[in-house]
Image: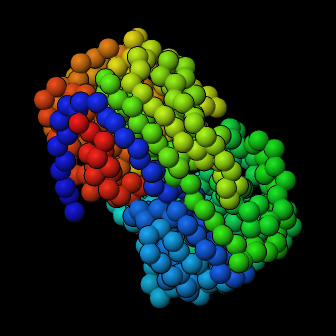
Amino acid sequence: MSKNEIVVKSGPLKGEIHIPGDKSISHRALLLSALADGPVEINGFLKGADPLETMACLRALGVKIDALSGDKLIVHGISGKFTKPKKPLYVGNSGTTIRILSGILAAQDFECEIAGDASINQRPMKRIVEPLSQMGAQLSGKVEKGQVFPPLKIKGAKLKGIKYKLPIASAQVKSSILLAGLFANGVTEVVEPDQSRDHTERMLKHFGVKIEQTERQIKLAGGQKLKGKTDILVPGDISSAAYLIAAAILVPGSALILRNVGLNPTRIGILEVLRRMGGGVEVLDEELLSEEPRGTLKVTNRKLKGIEIQGSLIPRLIDEIPVIAVLATQAQGDTVIKDARELRVKESDRIATVSGELKKMGVNITPTEDGMIITGGTKLKGTKVKSHGDHRLAMSLSIAGLIAEGKTEIEDTACVETSFPGFFKVLNSVKS
Ligand code: S3P
């Protein structure tokens, strides 16, 4: 289903927006609730395409889920004792679903297949195949050039705990191993090169699981129960808020209030970057609910300067790099992004697609092996650009369109449903 969207130059953006549920946390809320020993009520769930794929997979595995009105769900937890699905599980475009769910499937007493769309079939899975195989499961996929791609066949087994050093900082891989570890004999320990988002660890604690944790090291003992009769309140997604933050910073005269923004320290790299670029965002209030911090942000139009973004900051803003690239086009001086090779294996090769599409709008941007260099102070020109089926690219290009001369036509924008259903409606509601 391909749909085009036209964005024209905007006057000041004004108003208040309630940010919809966090995608990463919505996936985990479903998956961990299915592992709980009773019903769990989830509020603030993101009804985006990706979490809905997780929901469909869990239903196919015998988990009863009541989708109530609005963003409320009841998941009837069955302590992770799934039934063999009648046909291959389908995850659509969702890397989080395939990687994390595989950790649970690795411990089931049946064999099943898990598949996705054309983009998923190009995403590397060796990163989960290796550790889950070491734990005792049998996983196989399409092997090409030393990598493993979906569809995956997973034959569950009695697992044993391992100590695993992740070669890359990845919350999906970390979560896959930790959830497999819950079913394993003995202790499972994961060590990361840099800290990735820690939503799984926080939610496990919320369900009463004991974990030992330092910043880059997580340990848990197998056989622990997740307490049902728990409530989860999902905060809004800072990755979705990022587009509105960027819009308000870039469009002269703007002032937006963003409510319900998740402010988990492992996710707020973009706020740190904006502070360093001179475009600081005000945090008006903050509270901790269901182990996750959330708050209200006030964002106004600011002048930016180019900076270097690299190292341990990268996992804390990995999904925001496309929109950071758009912000950088308006900064004074160059912005250099390094250590972000992971961008090459996201929903699209974001180093290639972000550079290629922003170039069409007149930006001087150089893709590098592990990042990009963006020249600031560019007058953007509206033209026809492509999303490459990547939700984050579609939304980033729309923000560029707000400050471009003429009209920007973004091809294939249905993908925004992945993480931010109704994105264009929300944007139009604050535009003038
Ligand atoms: C996610 C982790 C990140 C992120 C993705 C969601 C998650 O991926 O880019 O959008 O929910 O765990 P990696 O684990 O591959 O770094």
Measuring 55% from the left and 19% from the top, which residue is drawn there?
A: 276
Q: Residue at x 47, y 68 (%)?
A: 71
Find residue 44 and report its horizontal and vertical position in percent: 52, 62
Q: Relative to the observer, which residue lies in front, 244 or 407?
A: 244
Q: Is residue 292 left or right of residue 299?
A: right
Question: Is residue 54 something one can see in this rendering?
Answer: yes
In the picture, the quarter occupied by the C terminus is top left
Q: Is residue 322 visible?
A: no
Q: Nearer the viewer, residue 237 or 87?
A: 237
Instruction: Judge from the rendering whether residue 6 lies leftward or rightward of residue 291; answer left or right.
Output: left
Residue farthest along the top direction in this orientation: 333
Q: Is residue 176 above or below residue 106?
A: above
Tally of marks: 0
Q: Position of residue 4 (x, y in %)?
A: 17, 50
Q: In the picture shown, does residue 67 fall above or below 431?
A: below
Placement of the N terminus among the 4 image quadrants: bottom left
In the depicted structure, whether residue 289 falls above or below residue 396:
below
Residue 100, quarter of the rendered image: bottom right
**Residue at 79% from the left image edge and 75% from the top image edge:** 225
303, above or below 27, in the image: above
Q: How is the image coloured?
A: rainbow
In the picture, residue 202 is in which quadrant? bottom right
Q: Residue furthest left?
A: 406
Residue found 35% across the figure and 58% down from its top: 421
Locate residue 374, reporting x and y percent.
Answer: 38, 20
Q: Position of residue 417 (x, y in %)?
A: 34, 58
